[in-house]
Amino acid sequence: MLPAVSVLLAMLVAQNQQLTPQEERGRQIFEHGTSASGKTIEALLAGSTRMPASILPCANCHGYDGLGRPEGGVVPPNITWEALTKPYGLTHSDGRVHPPYTERLLRRAITMGIDPAGESLNTTMPRFQLTMADATDLISYIKKLGWPVDPGLTDTTVHLGVILPPPSQGAKTSRIIQQALLKYFAHVNEAGGVFGRRIELAFTELPVEPTNRAGAISDFLRREQVFAVVGADFTGAESEIAAVMLRTGTPTIAALALLPQTDSPLNRYVFYLDGGVKEEVDALLAFAAKRFPGQSYRAAIISSDEENSREAAKWLRARLTESKFGHLVAANVPSSLGADLVFWLNSGLQSPPIAAGRDNRTTILIPGSLAAEVSSAPPNAEIFVARCAPSLPESAALDANSLERISWERAIASAEIITEGITRAGRNLSRAGLIQSLESFSNVQTSLPEAVSFGPNRRVGAGQVRVMRFDRQSQKLISVESDAHASAVGVH
Amino acid sequence: MLRILRALTLVLVAVAVLSTPSFGQQRSATSRDDLSATAQEYFTDVRLTTQNGDSVRLYSDLLKAKVVVINAFFGTCTGSCPKMSGILSGLQDRLGDHLGKDVWFLSFSVDPETDTPERLKEYADRFHAKPGWLFLTGKKENVDFALFKLGQKVARKEDHLTLFIIGNDKTGLWKKVFALSSTAESLQAVVESVLNDKG
C-alpha cells in the first residue's frame, strides 16, 4: 500500500512541475508577448497607439511571478489566480473596488480594459488584441502563476546539472571541475543548504564529436530534469548549446565558453564568467596599436580549423579593417618574409614558422584562453598574453598546473554565482526568480580576482582583460603596467 | 532632487520672463539673442551621442530655436519606458511631416553605459522612430550633466521620472506632462499649444 501511495504522491508532484502544452503556450504569451500560432499579438497602448505585445508582455510589469513590480509611479496589481478570484473581491491601491474575476471577466479585462465592476482599467495597462485561443492559453497559464512549475525543484532539494569537458581533453580537467563542485556544494549542504534545500548535482560529459554536443545536452536535460546548469563547458558548440538552454528555459552558468553568445536578441538564460576570446583579441589589438604606432607593420595571423581558433581569426580580420588599426597590415606571411607581430590563435604553441621582422624582433600576441602553455615559444620573440581577469592572477606561472588551477577557479566561481543567485531569489525559488536575482548582481565578489556584475542587458560577468608579458626566466606572466615599453590595456 | 527641480524651474521662469516682450507684439532681435544666449549659458553645449553615432551639442544642436518633447528612459527598462516610448511612437504618427521639421523628440538615456548607440538604434527601430526622434547617450558624466540641466538626473536609473517636458526655445515656454496618464492624443494637444506659442 505504502509504495503505491508514494508513487501517487510522486506523480502529483511531477504533475505540479510540468506545464501542459496549453499552459506552455500561455507562458510564451505571458513572458514574451508572442503567440505560438506565429501571428503577432497587437497591444493598444494609451488608448490609441498600436504596438506589438512583445514590447509590453505581461511579465514586464506584473513580474514573472505575477505579483506585480511597482516602477515609475505605477503599481501593477497581483494577478495570480488566487488574488484575482478572492470571493470577497478586490480593493486596489488607488481605491478601485470590484468583485472577483472569472475567466470570462479576465478575458474582457485583458482585451478591452474593463474590470469586473465595469470600470476602465488604468491606461497604463495595454489592451491586448488576443484571439480566443490565445486568451484561453494565457488564462490557463495565469492560473498556474505562483505554482512550482519549474523542474528540478522540491521543498528540500535543488537539482543542478553540470556539463564537463569531453574525454578527449584529458580526464584530468573533467575530474578537477567535478571535485571542485562536489566539494563546494558539500560545504553548502553541510551548512544547511539554501533555504533548507540541499543542492544535488547531476554530471554529464560533452561528447568527443562537437556536432553531437547540443543533442547530448538536450537529452541530458530531458533525462535529469535539472533546475539549472552550473560549471558548464560550451566548448566546440557554443551557439548550439546556448540555443538548447534558451529553448528549454534552463538558467546556466557557463564556466568554459570562449565565444559568449551575447548578440541581440539576448539569450536571457546563459550567464558567462567573462567575455572570452574576442575580448582578449580586442585587448591585444589595442595593445599592439599602442606598441606599434605610426608606421606600417606586418601582422601575421596564425590560426587553425578548430572552431574557436577560426572564430577568433575571423573576428581579428574584421577588426583589422578598422581605420584605427590601418597600420597593422594583416597578411598570411610566408615563413621567409617575416612578421613584426604575430597573432597566435592556435591552441598550444609550437615554434611558429615565422621569421623575425624588422630589427630581427618578433612580438607574439596570444589570447590566453586559447593557448594555455607558451613555454616552448621561439627564443627571439617577445610574448604577450591577454587574459580575461578572472582566469589568471598576476605573476602566475603559465604551465599545466596553472591550467588546472584555472579550471578549478572557474568551476568554483560558477558555483558561487549560482549559490548567491539562488540565495537572493529567496524561499519561493523559480527559474525566472533566479534569472532576476542574477541580473541584480553588481560587483559581487567571488573567489576570482575581479568582481562579477550582470544586468538585464549584460550576460558577461567580468569585463576586464589584462595584457601581460611572459617572462622567460621566471616562466611567469608580468603585468605590462610595470613594463617600460607599454601601458596597460583595459577593455570596458 | 528638489534643489535640481527648483534650479530648473527658476531658469525656465527666467527664460520665460526674458522671452516676454516688454512692449508691443514684436520682439526685437536683440532680446531673442539675449534669450538664446541665456539659454545656451544654462544648458551648455555638453557633447552627447545619438543612436546613429553622431556627436551633438545639447543646446546648439538639440534645443536651439526648436520645439522639443523630452523624456528620460533606459533601454532595459521594462515597465514605464516602453509605455512612454509607445506614446511617443503614437505621437510621431499623428505629427507626420512636422516631426523633424517643427518638433523634435529627445529621449535621454539615464543608463548611458549600457545604452550604447548601437543598442539605442535597435531600441529606436523597435518603436519605428523616424529621423526627428533622437535617442541620446554618451559619456556618463556628459549625459548626467545634461539630465541635471533638464531636472531629470536621478541616483538610480529605476528612479527616472515619467514626465514629458515640452519646450519651445524660441519663446521660452516649457510645459510638463505626466507621461503615464497621457495618450498620444492628449500629448499632441499640449505639443501643439507649445508649438503655437507666440511668446
Image (tube, rainbow, N blue to C red):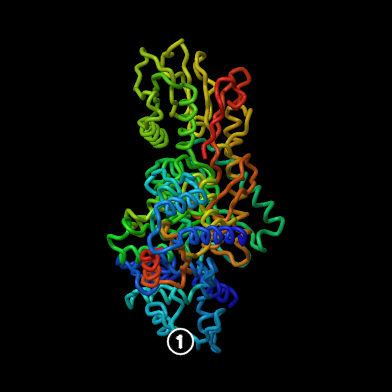
Q: Find numbered disc 1 in the image and state the secondary structure of the residue it sits on.
A: loop
Q: Residue furthest left?
A: B97
Image quarter of residue A116: bottom left
Tell me if residue B86 can be seen.
Answer: no
Left or right of A106: which side holds A89?
right
Residue toward you, A322 or B94: B94
User: What residue is at 37 percent from the left and 44 percent from the top?
Assistant: A211
Tell me if residue A389 can be seen.
Answer: yes
How many marks on residues? 1
Give how far across and how far down residue B87 sits, in percent.
Answer: 39, 66
Q: Relative to A383, say whether A58 is above or below.
A: below
Give how far across and how far down residue A113 sits, in percent.
Answer: 41, 79
Give how far across and how far down residue B8 sits, in percent.
Answer: 55, 58
The chain letter under disc 1 is A
Image quarter of residue B159: bottom right
Q: Relative to A312, say whether B168 is above or below.
A: below
Residue toward you, A382 or A298: A298
Q: Residues within 10 Å of mark 1 (few under 14, many from 20)?
A: some
Residue toward you, A287 or B172: B172
The N terminus of chain A: image quadrant: bottom right
Residue toward you, A458 or A470: A458
Q: Residue furthest front?
A: B23
Q: Residue furthest top?
A: A359
Give how far across and how far down residue A181 sits, in percent.
Answer: 61, 47
Left or right of B37: which side holds A451?
right
User: What residue is at 55 percent from the left and 89 percent from the top?
Assistant: A88
What residue is disc 1 on?
Answer: A116
- Amino acid of disc 1: Pro
